[in-house]
Amino acid sequence: MLTSNQALELDSAVVLFGQFPALSGVDLNVNQGEIVMISGPNGAGKTTLLCLLAGLVSMSFGKGEVQGIDLASRDKSELYKRVGLVSNNTMLYEDLTVLENLNFFYNLFLSASSPSNWTKRSKAKKKSNVNNAQDHLENEASNTSKELNKKRVTSKEEINERLKDTLEYIKLPRDSWKLPIRKLSTGQKRRVVLALQILRRPRLWLLDEPHAGLDEQGRNLLDETLKNATQKGATVVLASHEIDRATQLADRRLELKGGRF
Amino acid sequence: MKQIWQVCLKDLKVELRSRIVIFQVLPFAVLTIILFAFAFEADRAALRDYAPGLFWVTVLLATFLFVLRSFSIEVEAGAIQSLRLSAVKPQYIFFGKALALFIGMFILEVILGVATFFLYDVSVESPSLLIVSAILTTAAIASAATLYGILSANLKARETILPLLMLPVLIPVFLGAIRAFDDALGAVAVNGWAWLSVLGVFAFIYAVFGSFAFGEILEEVE
Amino acid sequence: MNLSTGSYRTKILGLVMAASFIALIIFAFWVSPNDDQQGGAVRLLYIHVPLAISTYVCYIACGIASLVFLIKKKIWWDYIALSTAEIGTIFCGLTLLTGAIWGRPIWNTWWEWGDVRLVTTLILFLLFLGYLALRAMPSSNPNANVRRAAVVAIVATIDIPIINRSVEWWQNRTLHQRSTLVELKIEDWTFFTLVLGFLAFGLLIIWLTIHRFRVAWLAGEIDSLETELALKKRLEESNI
């Protein structure tokens, strides 16, 4: 069992891909609100580790718990509601536009998070302001969103408003909002992926090489976003090669090599 | 329920944007109908008699391409991972994708049916049987095909293994659909309505089993 | 580790099986009489019918083992499914072959579309070829492949009765020996030989399954040894 200030715990986790142990015994302990950076050579298992924490890859041996959910449990939907993964892939539909993608995934996420959970969340938000929300979003849309949450309904206009706010926040040029994802540049794609996670407000952010492909402005934006998130109680685990940049941001740096620390 | 509809609409929207099915699969199906006419030496009587079988063979071939497309959009940039991370139940994804496949296939069948009507010179004796049997057949095909779609989505040789796995399973549907159309078009004197039960049972079994098995396989998709 | 696929008991089983096959050959060719209508061709049925029934036994076993595997997630069930599927497919091919050879003098054709069981068996053969093709595919994630295969096997097994019914309805008639045991005039030796055939093939299924299972199990052991080695290597990598 995790203690109240622990965000996740892995105990000698092994992940096998066929005969190949991508992770060969990982012990990891991260506290709530921490930013942990994972570095290491190519093929060290960074991406696998993030996928494991996101619940996309299953563990072959070992134990693990993320946000109070056992990684071995069959129904991972509770875990999926709490984590946000920014991976090397866009994980979006290349043929749909930026707005369509965000609209689809955000709406799907909202309707999959059942109403009862949704009210629990907003209650928790009221009690202590320890939430994963983005600062500016909170301020801009706080009053209306809280009222609407109480009613368990999020109107279309409300969602559109949030989408626009987020896209403006990540500084994606307005004329590219209606472009299909495949027409965007790498950096722009990254920003869209980031936007989706900002909307979802995960308790645990998992980012794979988040700085790659972003310009200076984008990097600053990313750092700011993550710092804001941790101030609201969220936890961040990021894999990166850019040690300088990430060390500034991170509270702790861990070196992954040969599938373990 | 809402999530099923969301997933379905998304699939249809991707198709409207990319137009792969409209501009590639549909013309391919019409082309197949024309090739069959050549194979039968354009013998009007023979074409009229065998129209149900030829129509449904063509639909099966088109289904195969349709399903490949339906799942390639999911694995292309890893969108299926985002679907999973949206915390949607796998069953809803299954039904959403199957519904989109059903709608798409049905539209394709209507267009292909009109083409067959003119090219093979068939006459319709029982429009109601024609429509009901087409709906049931399409439901059966869509649910089985969605299951096989996710099964092969991650395989390197998915284009070659998918037809080998999917087509034999669909033979009962195929036979039922042909017999129902035989009756509806007056090609062979059989009781087409009796076949609807086979089609219905098949659609039901595959929808139920598929929705559960879909989750089993989705867990392992990378 | 014992690398043999057999044991003392399987050797005895094998000997009994071999003896029963020798007996079957003797009875089929010399002891049992010619059939009034079929003449000597009836002797082929002594292997054709047991082969056909063995095929279905194997496939149903494969379906059940796959279902249990998906529920219990114990890899042994998958080994059983794989073993029975392979053996069943060989039997299925032989069933089709002996059926065609038998059909040539009796029905005057190698292949008869009017026969439901024949058509069903052919479709089943193709279904399980697909299953074996899926299993033979190289995969970066064997776990996933095993699950996929299990689903395919279950679907194929569920499909057996549906295919059978639909082909029957489709044809609306059947040529096959309605019930072989009734239609053949059951003279004592004919009946006895057929029972002997069932016995021999039953033993053959068990014997083959045990050995094939052992092979699958040993392959699994090698995999886990390789995994251990890979894990060691990976750990060394992390210590550099």
Image (cartoon, coloured by chain):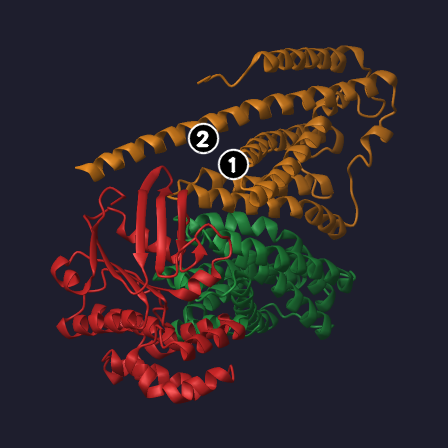
Chain colours: A red, B green, C orange
Decide if residue C182 is in sight here: yes
The mark nearer the N terminus, 2 or 1, is 1
Chain ID of residue with mark 1: C
Q: What is the x, y in percent for residue C177?
A: 80, 34
Q: What is the x, y in percent for residue A201?
A: 36, 72
Instruction: Return the residue found at the far left.
Output: A244
Chain ID of residue with mark 2: C
Q: Nearer the viewer, residue A93 or B61?
A: A93
Q: Quadrant of residue C68?
A: top right
Q: What is the x, y in percent for residue C119?
A: 67, 42
- Residue B50 as seen in the image, left or right of residue A120: right
Q: Are marks 2 and 1 in contact (CB under 8 Å)?
A: yes
- Badge 1: residue crowd in 10 Å (few <14, some 14–19, many ≥20): some
Q: Nearer the viewer, residue A211 or A98?
A: A211
Instruction: List the residue tagged with mark 1.
Output: C75
Q: Nearer the viewer, residue C159 or A157?
A: A157
3D distance between C-alphas at marks 2 and 1: 9 Å
Quarter the C terminus of chain A occupies: top left
Q: Nearer the viewer, residue A7 or A99?
A: A7
Location of residue C25 with respect to B82 vertically, above or below: above
Instruction: List the residue tagged with mark 2.
Output: C220
Location of residue A161 with respect to B79 vertically, above or below: below
Q: Quadrant of residue A56?
A: bottom left
Q: Are marks 2 and 1 on the same chain?
A: yes
Q: What is the x, y in percent for residue C176?
A: 77, 37
Q: Which residue is depicted at the point 31% across and 84% down? A: A165
Circle on res. C217:
none
- Residue C186 as seen in the image, left or right of residue A24: right
Q: Which residue is depicted at the point 11% across and 60% down? A: A244
Q: Secondary structure at mark 2?
A: helix
In the image, what residue type sits under mark 1?
A: Ile
Q: Quadrant of residue A100?
A: bottom left
